[in-house]
């Protein structure tokens, strides 16, 4: 068995890579080639990628090396190989949205966000898989394939979704960072279940033109990375803001919201979160209870709100015409939006706007709130037949990730399973809308206190 080429950014992250290429210790083309070799070695089993753009990516990498040698520096993200979720239009590459149904007319051409990646000098490796229409939290896709969570080589486990390929590609070291989207947890869930860091941006921080619209009221783009430090580099590189740096732990005041946020946790999740809280508290972070009764309301509201916008975007006629071709889990979710009337939807939209103001007031006096990202560790993937035999479940049965979106907040998920061992567990940090720099600064403080997470054993996938 040939040895696996090392992940070029694993040791020192984006900032270290940037320093090395500028010192001439490596090249962008060599880095890109290493990732292509890792994809060739691992992705046959993992199935994270929908499309690999090897030749165009290598041509871009070689051109960037020449630019850098000639004295043209595009900034801190120059040369970083990026995997893009397959709901984002990317010039020269297919966009399937995880489906066999043609929805190209709903996406349009490459949008402003992808253009910003290219201007920053990123190298687009290819497209990574998603749940069909980005409409599911397990990561399962019975139509175009479910990526294999690399934390268990024997049993295929859910990578979470809908940015399933982004989470798996990042966990396996198949890219410098991955782009995902997050409507009710689609970045934070895969980050938690794949053992990486995820940043759900404030709504509107990154433009979503050229991105398939699942729930336009809530859809956001964000990143999945090895670390909060890498996410901070991406934030700075794309916003031209200073890189968020860790803050002092002593003096941080974080809320522990209730009800529901800490209920029905797996024992492993409960242990990992408890240990994380103990270490943060020992470092000087104050964690205090905060009552958020609207959490119960959010769970109820999403039963109608998310499927309604899903059907409104996809189109009732197209959904009904192609329903039999769809993933059964996604089709069941769409069914729930067929009969929601405008006099139900409009009050929900109005209430969403009211809740953004309520959340801002409840956040007053806190630097953020902390919760588990997901209540469970990754479950085994069930067969299509098993899935079809189960009764449909509501879009969200617990508030941890959807509350962030419905409250208009930004959030991150940090891997904390290394504190207790076992399958991946995520710690979610929520901050007020617009406070993404502060969010990443606090997440970097968490990283310093809690330490780097372990990495999955990839040899069985070769």
Image (spheres, rainbow, N blue to C red):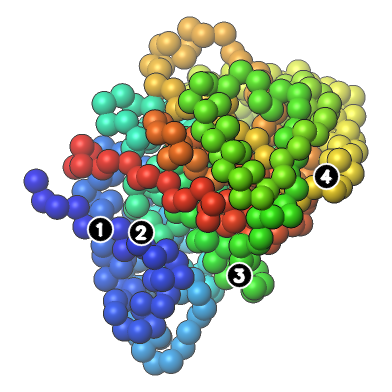
Q: Secondary structure at mark 4?
A: helix
Q: Residue 136 occupies which quadrant of the picture? A: top right
Measuring from the top left, give residue 387's x and y in whole percent. Answer: 47, 14
For the point 70% across and 59% down, the residue is 438
Which residue is pictured at 26% across the width and 26% down the height?
Answer: 154
The residue where tag 3 is placed is 243
Residues tagged 4 and 2 counted as in contact (Cβ below 8 A): no
Are the residues at dot 1 and dot 2 in contact (C-beta closer than 8 Å)? yes
- In the picture of the structure, the residue carrying the numbered disc 4 is 363
Circles 3 and 1, Cβ within 8 Å, touching? The answer is no
Q: CA distance from mark 4 to mark 3?
A: 24 Å
Nearest-to-viewer mark from 4 and 1: 4
Quadrant of the image occupied by residue 293: top right
Q: Residues within 10 Å of mark 4 (few under 14, many from 20)?
A: many
Q: Which mark is residue 319?
A: none
- Vertical comparison of 22 with 406: above or below: below
Sequence order check: which comes first, mark 3 or mark 1? 1
Q: Which mark is residue 10?
A: 2
Q: Earlier in the sequence, mark 3 or mark 2?
A: 2
Residue with the most extreme bottom position: 70
Give the x, y percent position of residue 28.
34, 73
Question: Nearer the N terminus, badge 4 or badge 2?
Answer: 2
The one of 275 and 142 positioned closer to us in this rendering: 275
Query: As drawn, is 168 to the left or to the right of 370?
Result: left
Q: Are marks 4 and 1 in contact (CB under 8 Å)?
A: no
Q: Label 1, on which residue?
A: 6
Camera sees residue 149: yes
Q: Residue at x 46, y 70 (%)?
A: 15
Q: CA distance from mark 3 to mark 1?
A: 27 Å
Q: Going by the image, does 320 lie left or right of 80?
A: right
For the residues marked 4 and 1, what is the alpha-carbon distance in whole angstroms? Answer: 43 Å
């Amino acid at each position: 068995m040939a040895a696996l080429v090392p992940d070029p950014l694993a040791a020192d992250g984006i900032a270290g890579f940037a320093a090395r290429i500028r010192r001439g210790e490596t090249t962008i083309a060599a880095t890109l080639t290493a990732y292509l070799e890792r994809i060739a070695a691992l992705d046959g089993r993992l199935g994270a990628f929908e499309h690999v753009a090897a030749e165009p990516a290598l041509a871009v990498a070689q051109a960037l090396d020449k630019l850098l040698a000639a004295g043209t520096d595009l900034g801190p993200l120059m040369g970083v190989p990026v995997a893009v979720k397959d709901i984002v239009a990317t010039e020269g590459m297919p966009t399937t949205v995880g489906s066999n149904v043609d929805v190209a007319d709903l996406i349009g051409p490459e949008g402003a966000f992808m253009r910003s990646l290219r201007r920053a000098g990123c190298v687009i490796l290819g497209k990574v898989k998603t749940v069909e229409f980005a409409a599911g939290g397990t990561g399962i896709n019975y139509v175009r394939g479910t990526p294999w969570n690399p934390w268990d080589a024997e049993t295929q486990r859910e990578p979470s979704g809908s940015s399933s390929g982004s989470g798996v590609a990042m966990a396996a070291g198949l890219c410098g960072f991955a782009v995902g989207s997050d409507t009710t947890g689609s970045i934070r869930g895969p980050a938690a279940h794949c053992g990486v860091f995820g940043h759900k941006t404030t709504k509107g921080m990154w433009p979503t033109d050229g991105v398939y619209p699942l729930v336009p009221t809530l859809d956001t783009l964000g990143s999945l990375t090895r670390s909060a430090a890498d996410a901070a580099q991406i934030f700075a590189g794309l916003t031209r803001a200073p890189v968020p740096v860790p803050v002092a732990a002593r003096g941080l005041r974080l809320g522990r919201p209730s009800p529901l946020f800490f209920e029905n946790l797996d024992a492993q999740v409960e242990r990992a979160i408890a240990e994380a809280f103990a270490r943060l508290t020992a470092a000087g972070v104050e964690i205090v209870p905060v009552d958020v009764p609207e959490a119960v309301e959010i769970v109820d509201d999403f039963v109608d709100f998310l499927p309604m916008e899903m059907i409104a975007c996809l189109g009732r006629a197209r959904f009904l015409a192609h329903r039999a071709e769809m993933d059964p889990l996604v089709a069941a979710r769409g069914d729930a939006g067929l009969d929601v009337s405008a006099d139900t939807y409009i009050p929900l939209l109005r209430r969403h706007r009211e809740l953004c103001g309520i959340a801002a007031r409840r956040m007053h006096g806190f630097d953020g709130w902390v919760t588990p990202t997901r209540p469970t560790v990754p479950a085994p993937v069930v067969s299509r037949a098993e899935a079809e035999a189960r009764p449909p479940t509501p879009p969200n049965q617990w508030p941890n990730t959807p509350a962030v979106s419905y409250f208009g907040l930004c959030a991150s998920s940090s891997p904390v399973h290394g504190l207790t061992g076992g399958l991946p567990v995520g710690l979610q940090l929520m901050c007020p809308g617009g406070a993404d720099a502060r969010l990443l600064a606090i997440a970097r403080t968490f990283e310093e206190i809690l330490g780097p997470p372990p990495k999955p054993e990839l040899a069985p996938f070769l």
